[in-house]
């Protein structure tokens, strides 16, 4: 299932007005079918980290294949002043571009084309906004999730609890992206159903408040949910009421052969509370009971709790995951790099805002001795083979590299995707597995929460030469 | 139109799993129809400011009135282990609660109930997640938008350009909420159509790049769009190429009687560039041309540009509006305060996390001499008249107030809303107008970007006495 397939088949208006204004402009000039190439890339890995997990491609392809303009939509555009002839053109709109992209779930890096789109100028212009809207957010959240997974390690359960603080319907894509980024489950039922993600959730404070006593609330819940039960222990007083009541009820059920799953801490000092809780639970012979923590969880808190040996088995992660609290946007852009076979650039006083010309593709060099990702190489899309040398154009040192082909296995990363017929073959498990494998191949230094080094992305000399030439002509 | 009405009529699964787990629990215990009262409130005005604009009620009511469980949804829940009897109950689900809320667009303050929901316990539990999901985000963005409007003043155009960095479909609610918060328009076409918001947008860099020269690009655009034209001037070099070309083309069209609308600056030092641009345009006799600025715009930038007398007529605001960049979540919560007529509390070591008991309503005291909001008074929902004295419970000083009824006009703020039949009467213009009027009545000190004082919310003694009593009983 998909937001962009099952809710609507009329996504044409899900765009910024200027895309349609420009598309009409191209159309009225007879330029709308000129062959264009746009590329999607970002400029900075978020959160001070060393990588981005590319996510959202599945929903983007759904959106593109369902991009239509109904009569109702056309009427609205007419009222905005669009012209009849252009509306006739939109009436038959069916996206004709070709998508070349990193497979979803890949680890990607600043400035390399993550997606390249080729096709009719007007079509490629119209899709800009929706492409950015989906890919920027999904990639941001998959990345945020993976940072938490890296810090937490493999054994710990991470669950998305963010629906209440997510930006409206963003909660669905958040659940999707965080699962790709290594989370185990979501609390969001609709997301679970749509994307086939495990769903979890037990009780809130209101459950406990609704009974006359906490013990009674725990007991009734355990009666119904047995070994699925997780007691929320901070409604009144964690140490003096919540945990003692949890133990009392758990022991009672143990006698009936039912092992209560655990407790959840939702406030207070998690180091102190989790240690005391573990000790008390163990003393009571309840060492099978898990300790789950929620409230203000992010990679920095997980890292600190691990460092201080807090015995925590799982985290419910809300606000800071789904809003990407410390950096709520990925700076991905979608830029024209070629029109009618002619390369295009954008110049800026800010060197990082320069756009390099030509349709490009990406090769990834993998160190044969370690199996780790070594560097990426951006080359013209029609290149036969690899260049001998390349430049880290956006790096302050602009270092060059001579490519020793014997040392590296080199893989072409951008793959063609059809918007129409490949959606059935997408599997979120495959994507999630790809992410895990890519992260395993990433050098450790790039997995730090705040990186000191950055992964090198080199551009073939040919691209830089073309850029310098075009710059002179402006 | 509405996301929650036109896309789906099956929003039952748009919730956190634990809501359904608890609802089934209540159901199996025969408690699901017990009369409950929940309240929605937040604890802190975001961004260091002094107020929140309450938004999202319209979409919440749409969501509640379209909350159903299709057979397909029930099948999914069955696979998650829910029991047949409970699924039968959900099959007939139609939300039965009553909503009491501040009218949408109201200025609201920390700790007061912004929405009170009364009705069957299970229903009120199930809606928690979607209520928080919609209200937290919409209110956050309406507030952010209003901060920019306050700083920019009335004459300046503010437009939402945020779709590409919004969190997926959050872009729609962002456009809606920012319009309520005083923005003039959005670039988001679907949001414009759904919510009846003016849409604007002219050209991106790609338009200019797609031509062989910038001048040619400007000329073709002006030919088609005439007085709607805004030239984007930073594709190659703002001062040496963009502005001179804009002037050249504008003068040419002036001769034909067409007044080009303006230019847009999208990078660089906006103080310097806007001053130079204004001077150059004026020298060329183009004083009617407007200067629009986009890129990293927020209230702090607008404030600085105004302070430095940058002659800017309008702003396109993207990322920092729609993601609420410096604080991407409002901390709104939804808490049980009464069950079967019995008041309920939540206790915490953190004093701000205490939940006060009883179904409540809010009166606002307006200073008769100034017409400004003076303080709010939270009282039991069934109060006859005002109390004589009240306590600012959550304020560090916990000051009390004796209410001099001759000095204030007192207005009851929470109004009943029906989820079924009142949606047609909602008008975004009425809501926006209410917001403007409320902001006019807000004391100036609370409109500062970082406030030193806070608006006082007093709680009737009766509520505090009840709280102290219940606290002893736990």
Image (cartoon, coloured by chain):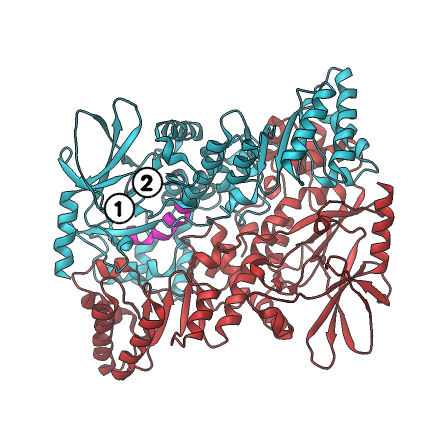
Chain colours: A red, B cyan
Residue A177: x %, y % from top left: 54, 60
Residue nearer the viewer, B377 or A261: B377
Residue B381 in view in this figure: no
Q: Are marks 1 and 2 on the same chain?
A: yes
Residue nearer the viewer, B70 or B461: B461
* Residue wearing tag 1: B395
Residue A357: x %, y % from top left: 80, 50
Is residue A406 one of those drawn in magenta? no
Residue B39 in view in this figure: yes
- Which quadrant, please, contains the C terminus of chain B? bottom left
For the residues labelled 1 and 2, say whether their Cβ atoms are less than 8 Å apart.
yes
* Residue wearing tag 2: B454
Residue nearer the viewer, B231 or B4: B231
Q: CA distance from mark 1 to mark 2?
A: 9 Å
What secondary structure is found at the residue carrying circle 1? Answer: loop
Determine the residue positioned at 45% across, 69% down.
Answer: A302
Pinpoint the chain carrying mark 2. B
Determine the residue positioned at 34% across, 64% down.
Answer: B82
Among the two numbered marks 1 and 2 on one chain, the one whose residue lies closer to the N terminus: 1
């Amino acid at each position: 299932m998909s937001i962009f397939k099952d809710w609507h088949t009329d996504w044409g208006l899900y765009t910024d007005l200027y895309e349609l204004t420009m598309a009409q402009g191209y159309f009225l000039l007879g330029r709308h079918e000129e062959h264009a190439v746009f590329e999607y890339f970002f400029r900075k890995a978020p959160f001070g980290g060393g990588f981005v997990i590319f996510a959202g491609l599945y929903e983007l392809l759904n959106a593109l294949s369902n991009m239509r303009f109904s009569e109702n939509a056309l009427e609205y555009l007419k009222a905005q002043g669009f012209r009849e002839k252009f509306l006739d053109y939109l009436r038959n709109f069916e996206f004709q571009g070709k998508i070349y992209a990193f497979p979803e779930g890949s680890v990607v890096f600043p400035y390399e084309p993550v997606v390249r789109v080729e096709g009719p100028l007007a079509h490629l212009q119209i899709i800009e906004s929706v492409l950015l809207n989906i890919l920027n957010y999904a990639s941001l959240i998959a990345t945020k999730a993976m940072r938490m997974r890296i810090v937490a390690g493999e054994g710990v359960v991470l669950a998305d609890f963010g629906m209440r603080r997510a930006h409206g319907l963003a909660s669905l894509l958040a659940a999707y992206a965080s699962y790709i980024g290594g989370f185990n489950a979501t609390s969001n039922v609709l997301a679970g159903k749509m994307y086939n993600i495990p769903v979890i959730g037990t009780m809130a404070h209101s459950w406990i408040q609704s009974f006359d006593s906490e013990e009674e609330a725990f007991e009734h819940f355990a009666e119904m949910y047995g070994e699925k039960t997780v007691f929320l222990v901070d409604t009144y007083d964690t140490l003096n009421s919540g945990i003692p009541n949890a133990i009392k009820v758990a022991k009672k059920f143990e006698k009936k052969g039912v092992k209560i799953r655990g407790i959840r801490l939702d406030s207070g000092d998690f180091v102190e509370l989790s240690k005391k809780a573990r000790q008390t639970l163990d003393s009571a012979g309840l060492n099978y009971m898990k300790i789950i923590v929620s409230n203000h969880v992010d990679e920095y808190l997980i890292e600190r709790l691990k460092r201080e040996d807090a015995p925590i088995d799982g985290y419910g992660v809300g606000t800071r995951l789904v809003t990407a609290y410390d950096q709520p946007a990925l700076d991905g852009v979608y830029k024209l790099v070629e029109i009618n076979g002619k390369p295009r650039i954008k110049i800026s006083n800010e060197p990082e805002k320069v756009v390099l010309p030509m349709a490009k593709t990406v090769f990834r060099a993998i160190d044969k001795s370690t199996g780790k990702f070594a560097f990426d190489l951006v080359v013209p899309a029609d290149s036969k083979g690899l260049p001998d040398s390349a430049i880290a154009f956006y790096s302050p040192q602009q270092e060059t590299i001579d490519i020793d082909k014997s040392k590296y296995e080199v893989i072409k990363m951008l793959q063609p995707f059809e918007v129409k017929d490949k959606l059935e073959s997408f599997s979120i498990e495959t994507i999630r597995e790809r992410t895990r494998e890519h992260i395993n191949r990433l050098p450790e230094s790039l997995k730090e929460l705040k990186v000191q080094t950055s992964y090198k992305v080199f551009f073939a000399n040919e691209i830089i030469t073309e850029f310098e030439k075009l710059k002179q002509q402006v």
